Image (cartoon, rainbow, N blue to C red):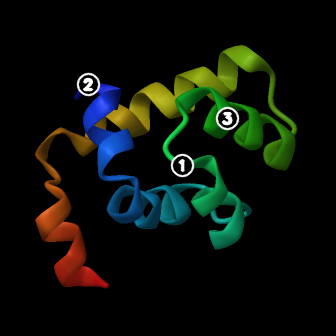
Amino acid sequence: MIWERIKSNWNQYQVRAKEQWSKLSEEQLANLQGSREALASRIREAYGLGAEEAEKQLAGWQALQTDREPSLLRRRT
C-alpha cells in the first residue's frame, strides 16, 4: 500500500498502529499526523530498536494494511 493512502486516512490507521505498537500512546500517534519517518522514530525510541529493525516492522505493518480499508476500521472502533 502506498503510504500516502495511510497518511491521508491516518485517523483510522492509527488505531491499527496502536494495536501493533502498544507502547505508543494515542497522543503520540495522533501527533505524527501520518508521517512515516516520525512513526519509525517513535518505534525506535519506544522499543529500543535500531533503524533497520524499526523499518522492517513498519514495512511489514504497512504491507498488512493492503486489505484494510479505513471504512472497515471505523466499524471496529
User: Counting residues from the N terminus, which is met first, the one under dot 3 or under dot 2?
Assistant: 2
- Type of amino acid under label 3: Ala
Q: Nearer the viewer, residue 50 or 7?
A: 7
Report the residue marked by disc 1.
33
Label 1 crowd bin: few (<14), some (14–19), many (20+), radius 10 Å: some
Q: Which amino acid type is marked by label 1?
A: Gln
Q: Is residue 55 above or below residue 67?
A: above
Secondary structure found at label 3: helix
- Which residue is denoted by mark 3 in the rendering? 38
Q: CA distance from mark 3 to mark 1?
A: 9 Å
Mark 1 or mark 2: whose residue is earlier in sequence: 2
Residue 18 relative to residue 14: left or right: right
Q: Which residue is mark 2?
A: 2
Asked whether residue 25 is in view, the answer is no
Q: Nearer the viewer, mark 1 or mark 2?
A: 1
Tell me what residue is drawn at x 39 percent, y 53 percent.
10
Instruction: Verify CB contact (< 8 Å) between mark 3 and mark 1.
Output: yes
Q: What residue is at 80 percent from the left and 22 percent from the top?
A: 50
Q: CA distance from mark 3 to mark 2?
A: 16 Å
Position of 16 compared to 57: left or right?
Answer: left
